[in-house]
Structures are given as C-alpha cells and as structure tokens.
C-alpha cells in the first residue's frame, strides 16, 4: 500500500504513521519554502536548538520517506502527481480554497488516479475557512468548560485530544473506503472535521444534557454519574491513588479491603445514586482508610478483590511499566535518534 501524506502538525501525520506501522509505504511531502512541517520547530526548552526535528514532530512521524517540495511550483507539483498516479491514499488537511489553489484537491487527484482515496481533515467543516488548532476546538466543543477543578478556570487537556480523535475518525473512514474499493474498484473522498470528531466524542456528557438538561460543570476527576469514581486518595507512603468504582459489589469489596465494612450497609452509601449524593462524606471516610495502608498493598490486594484502582504516575513512572516500554518505536531520523509511542494498540492473531 502506498500513502501520500500532505498533512502537517498532528492529526493527519498520526494517520500516516498508523499506516506506516502496518507496513505501508508512506511518503510525507513537506513544504520546502517554510522548512517543512511546522512542528519541527516546536521544541521544548530542554531540547537541543539545532536538531532537525523536535520531539513533537517525532511523535507522529516514524518510518516515512520525507520529500521536500514547493507545491506552488509546477515542476514540484508534477513530482507529486507522479507519486499520486499509483498511490492508494492521500492524506491532507487543507482548507478547500487552499487545496484548489495549490492543485492538490480531490478532483485534481482523482483525474490523475480514479482509484485514489483522499482523506482530508478540516477544522470546522468543508465550507469553513476558519483557522483551527486543538485548543480552539477543545473550547468550542465543550471540553474545556467541563475540564478542570470546580473552583478553577476552564482547562485544556494536556494532549491535543481533538487532533487524536479526528485522526482515529479518519483512519476508520479510510479503512472503510479501502474496503469498499475492494468491492467496487472506485476511489472516494473521506472528510473529517475536528469539530465533528470532538462532538461525536462527548458521549455521556452530551446525553446528560440532551436527556436530563444537565450542563456538565468542572468536577476535577470526578464522574457526575458514579461515586466513588475519580476521587484521589493519598496512601500511607504518600502515593496518590484513584478509584473507579462502577457498581455496588465493587464498593462492598472496596470497603472490605479498607477495613470499613460497616459502610456497606450505611444508608448513605448502599447504592450508587446515594453515594453520588453523599460523595463528600464518603470521601472523608475513604481518605482516612487509605492513609493507613501503603500503595503497594492496596494495588496488590485490589487484584484479589477485583477493585478498579490505579496509581497516578508521572511520565518517568509510566515508563517503568513493561507495557509502555514495549510500545516504544525508535529510528534514526535525519541523523538524530528519535523515539515515540506506537500508534497501534491492537493485536491481530491469525486464525
């Protein structure tokens, strides 16, 4: 499979890397006039200044062939068209007018290769020329309003989550289009907007409004429908642990583990809805119990009791997990050793 990646920043390149990991030949076209993908320059203060790529760029660019072209020049456009002629997929993130002006719109590509599948990511839809970055979409789609502490400001998530969600939507659309082409022999245009990707991911928070008239407010890590869920507790050895108690049986098992079995029959906490109503009182009981036990003990015993509990880890601690290290991809990228996480978290076993 041959993929031409015209996209930049995060969402589109993440799709290209997904196909590269699955074994596709991915050719990434970067703008020679501007020095390539803008994320090459998005360096942390701790990164070396003169390296060709940043850690951000490396996160979604692995095992790709990079070709610098100036698509405003006819000779370079012809080079691109030659690559498109026998390609399977084009990935782009152009606004409509820009794509037409550069001669890289779907109609132009389809004339070169009728079987081409063209995937395009926009910010606010095909008809909008509005410039979009992830934090703007987090704001517009309600995520920022919901995110943060109750007494704090609206807060963006630390990962460009809307870009990641849009990338997943485009992957699904392209895979569906590829499957349809196997049957029909025809190409397709697959379009995803960051806004619609964000809206489709509002899940229960959207239905809480649509069905119950509830506007989700900032609650930190708490869950509006479940308790204790998202509460953070400090163990005897000063580790931070978070709970995700999803049903009454898990709550009963938690109480047994924490040696506070008397709470199981307490009328304030017997059922989930009562625990949601009285979550502050419940949190005080639980914090006292957690403070008497070590994190290692709680995590080990939670396996026996089948209790969903996790330790809050910083990035260093995350990579103490075997599972995290197994997902690291390394390569020499323009003379620089680069590392990133695999974009694939599934495994297919042949029957």
Image: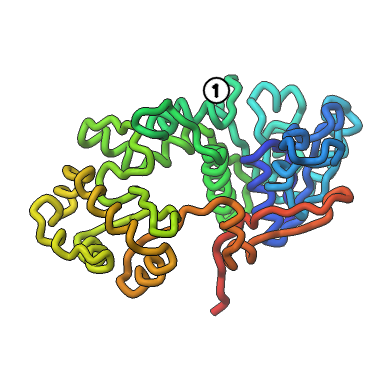
* Viewer-proximal residue among 334 and 292: 292
At horizontal 68% and vertical 43% (from top left) the residue drawn is: 13
Name above or below for residue 203 compared with residue 338.
Answer: above
At horizontal 41% and vertical 34% (from top left) the residue drawn is: 148
Looking at the picture, how far across and down is residue 206, in whole percent?
32, 36
At horizontal 56% and vertical 29% (from top left) the residue drawn is: 123
**Residue 289 visible within the image:** yes
**Residue 115 visible within the image:** no
At horizontal 68% and vertical 51% (from top left) the residue drawn is: 17
Looking at the picture, how far across and down is residue 37, in whole percent?
76, 35
Q: Quadrant of residue 128?
A: top right
Residue at the farthest right position:
75
Residue topped by disc 1 = 127
Q: Are there few (<14), some (14-19), or many (20+) residues within 10 Å of tag 1?
A: few
Looking at the picture, how far across and down is residue 217, in whole percent?
32, 31
Quadrant, the N terminus: bottom right
Looking at the picture, how far across and down is residue 194, in whole percent?
53, 34
Left or right of 309, for residue 169: right
Quadrant, the C terminus: bottom right
Name above or below for residue 88 compared with residue 125.
Answer: below
- Secondary structure found at label 1: loop
Residue at the farthest bottom position:
351
* Viewer-proximal residue among 233 and 42: 233
Left or right of 110, for residue 209: left
Left or right of 155, for residue 106: right
């Amino acid at each position: 499979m041959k993929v031409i990646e015209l996209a930049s920043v995060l969402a589109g390149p993440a799709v290209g890397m997904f196909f590269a990991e699955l074994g596709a030949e991915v050719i990434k076209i970067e703008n020679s006039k501007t020095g390539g993908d803008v994320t090459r320059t998005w360096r942390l203060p701790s990164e070396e200044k003169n390296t060709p790529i940043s850690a951000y760029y490396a996160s979604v660019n692995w095992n790709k062939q990079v070709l610098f072209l100036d698509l405003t020049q006819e000779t370079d456009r012809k080079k691109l068209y030659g690559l498109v002629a026998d390609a399977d997929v084009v990935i782009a993130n152009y606004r409509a007018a820009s794509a037409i002006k550069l001669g890289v719109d779907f109609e132009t590509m389809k004339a070169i290769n009728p079987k081409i599948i063209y995937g395009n990511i926009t910010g606010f839809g095909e008809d909008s020329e509005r410039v979009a970055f992830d934090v703007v979409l987090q704001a517009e789609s309600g995520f920022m309003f919901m995110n943060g502490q109750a007494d704090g400001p609206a807060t963006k998530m630390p990962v460009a989550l809307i870009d990641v969600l849009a990338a997943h939507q485009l992957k699904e659309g392209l895979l569906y289009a590829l499957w349809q082409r196997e049957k029909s022999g025809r190409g397709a245009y697959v379009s995803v907007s960051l806004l619609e990707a964000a809206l489709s991911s509002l899940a229960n928070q959207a239905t809480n409004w649509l069905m119950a008239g509830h506007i989700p407010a900032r609650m930190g890590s708490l869950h509006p429908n479940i308790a204790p869920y998202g509460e953070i507790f400090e163990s005897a050895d000063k580790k931070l642990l978070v709970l995700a108690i999803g049903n009454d049986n898990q709550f009963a098992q938690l109480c047994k583990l924490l040696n506070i079995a008397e709470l199981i029959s307490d009328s304030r906490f017997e059922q989930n809805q009562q625990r949601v109503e009285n979550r502050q009182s419940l949190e005080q009981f639980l914090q006292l119990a957690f403070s008497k036990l070590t994190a290692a003990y709680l995590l080990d015993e939670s396996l026996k009791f089948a209790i969903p509990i996790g330790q809050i880890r910083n990035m260093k601690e995350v990579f103490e997990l075997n599972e995290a290290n197994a997902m690291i991809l390394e390569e020499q990228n323009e003379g620089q050793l680069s590392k990133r996480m695999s974009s694939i978290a599934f495994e297919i076993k042949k029957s």
